[in-house]
Amino acid sequence: MRRTVTLVIAALLLAACNGKPEVREPDPSDSPTASAAPTMPAQAKEDSDEGAAAFVAHWIDVFNFAARTGEIEPLTELGPNCEACNNYAKGLQENFEAGDAPEHDLWTFNDLLVGESQDDKIDLQVRVEAEYADGREEHELGFELERSEHYEVADIYVIEEDS
């Protein structure tokens, strides 16, 4: 049973003047090459709303890297117990092996809201733009992160749009 996630605009954030976590741009030297996965930025390791947002932005970068290269291990390491993550990774690998690897990013990180934290978990609502063969489409996804020594993705799910 999926619990209802009550999202709050991150008014608690002192650094973000627009009410959203401010994700700093990663160091250009950390940019992925054709054969190396993106390096996790230092901000993504911070135990803060901004750190959680940076972690999700990094997850999306690694997702796009896996789609282009078929290398899914860096993606599965970010959510080893996340069934949805592992299903995404398997699909990306199958597409790559079938010769259907994109030359561009599949998902573009557009917007994020931080939800309530409970115990060692934090929920985020992320808006991504997905590129398909016939065009682009916006999706809202929920990311449930677990806090430990660092963040890990526990679950990813599509947030149902109101009709």
Image (tube, rainbow, N blue to C red):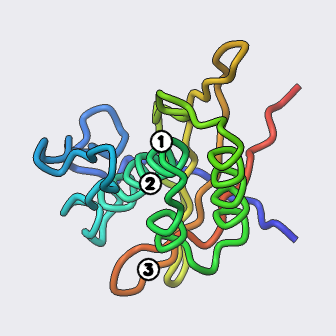
Describe the element under mark 3 as helix, strand or loop.
strand
Q: Reading the chain from its start, which is encountered first: label 2 or label 1?
A: 2
Looking at the picture, how far across and down is residue 35, in whole percent? 33, 51
Looking at the picture, how far across and down is residue 52, in whole percent? 38, 61
The C terminus: image quadrant: top right
Label 1 crowding class (10 Å Cα cut-off): few <14, some 14-19, many 20+? Answer: many
Q: In this view, does 159 lie above or below 87?
A: above
Residue denoted by label 3: 147
Q: Residue at point 41% right, 73% down?
A: 151
2 and 1 marks in contact (CB < 8 Å): yes
Describe the element under mark 2 as helix, strand or loop.
helix
CA distance separating discs 3 and 1: 18 Å
Q: Which of the two discs, 3 and 2, sits closer to the camera?
A: 2
Is 64 left or right of 92, judged from the image as shown? left
Q: Residue at point 71% right, 43% down?
A: 98
Q: Which of the two discs, 2 and 1, sits closer to the camera?
A: 2
Q: Reading the chain from its start, which is encountered first: label 3 or label 2?
A: 2
- The tag on residue 112 is 1
Label 2 crowding class (10 Å Cα cut-off): few <14, some 14-19, many 20+? Answer: many
Q: What residue type is labelled 1?
A: Leu
Q: Reading the chain from its start, which is encountered first: label 3 or label 1?
A: 1
Q: What residue type is labelled 2?
A: Val
CA distance separating discs 3 and 2: 13 Å
3 and 2 marks in contact (CB < 8 Å): no
Q: Which amino acid does label 3 sit on?
A: Arg
Looking at the picture, how far across and down is residue 140, in whole percent? 65, 38
Residue denoted by label 2: 56
Q: In this view, does 82 lie above or below 88?
A: below
Is 14 left or right of 12, judged from the image as shown? left
